[in-house]
Image: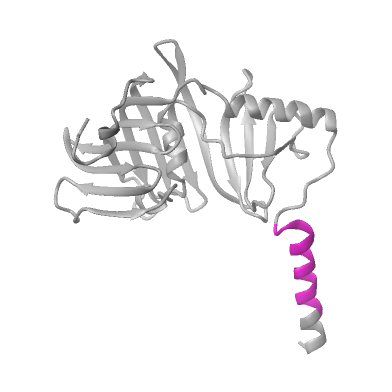
Amino acid sequence: MNNTFRFCSFSFFVLLFLVYGCSYPRPKTDPALDKKALSLALQAKSYNQQVHSSKGLGWAVLQTPEKPGKKEKYKIAWAAQFPNKIRITFLLSGLPVETIISTGQKITFLSHTGQHSLHSYESEDPDMGRYVHVPVKMSQIILMLVGRLPIKDFNDAYFSPDSNTLSDIILRKDKETQMQYLQINKVGLPDQISITDFTDEPLYRIMIKHYENFSGLDIPSRIEVQDRLGRKLTVRISSFKANPPLKEGVFLLTDPG
């Protein structure tokens, strides 16, 4: 490979970066349909927006391809406050094994079994992939546990040109390399949210398998998150209380709430 070819190749990729911002190029679409897609997407993002906090019980199941057929299943108890505060405890056989507290400034891990020492680190929105096996942010877990839909911010929406129906919506945000795909059901709510990288290759998908009514609210009560490596997190909500009063001490280790 000669130097001229190397230079031209490098220049070509620089040009692509400058033109597309290192993201998959946006297709030309019908502005009228874009308006409808945006309306549906905003409706989904604002779902249950009146819920600002929650307490609940449920189950978290972790599965990895490295251990086929084996599941890590924990009962979970949580108190969460939108947008960035949560206290969640994982239990086995009714006994607590781990508590995680996130305050929007730092995240703290407490082992109830001596598995590790108490430790914290500063983060407004921690990446939880290391702990739950799938690459979700704490903000997305909080959205799930307060009864909302884990849709990231966006400022552009359009129907997928690859779909023959108006049920697949693509969401983008300026300067973001990731895109979101919403699969809309018959009542206008997504039953699947897929996240792709800048080449439009899937990173992970969130599937809402069931909605359940708790005190007059339809809450996504069974959610599966699976990444492209086949790792999967399933969250099942069995008890849910919307907008309970939460003391600030709930999110401190000195007060178990």
Name the residue furthest bottom: 2
Image coordinates of residue 89 in percent, x first then y, are 25, 37
In this orientation, which residue lies closer to the viewer: 239 or 253? 253
Name the residue furthest top: 216
In the rendered image, the vertical position of residue 119 relative to residue 62, given as above or below: below
Residue at the spot 69% in from the left edge and 28% down from the top edge:
167
Image coordinates of residue 72 in percent, x first then y, are 29, 43
Horizontally, is 195 left or right of 164 in the view? Answer: left
Q: By what rule are the colours in the image chosen?
A: one colour
How many numbered marks appear? 0
Q: Is residue 76 visible?
A: no
In this orientation, which residue lies closer to the viewer: 257 or 10? 257
Image coordinates of residue 5 in percent, x first then y, are 81, 83
Residue at the spot 63% in from the left edge and 24% down from the top edge:
43
Residue at the spot 39% in from the left edge and 26% down from the top edge:
53
Q: Find the magenta span and give its range.
A: 8-22
Quarter of the picture holding the N terminus: bottom right
Horizontally, is 166 left or right of 134 in the view? Answer: right
Task: Name the main secondary structure of what is drawn in magenta.
Answer: helix
Res 12 → quadrant: bottom right
In this orientation, which residue lies closer to the viewer: 252 or 166? 252
In this orientation, which residue lies closer to the viewer: 107 or 47? 107
Magenta run includes residue 166: no
Q: Is residue 232 visible?
A: yes
Magenta run includes residue 20: yes
In the rendered image, the vertical position of residue 116 relative to residue 86, given as above or below: below
Name the residue furthest front: 248
Quarter of the picture holding the C terminus: top left
Res 75 → quadrant: top left
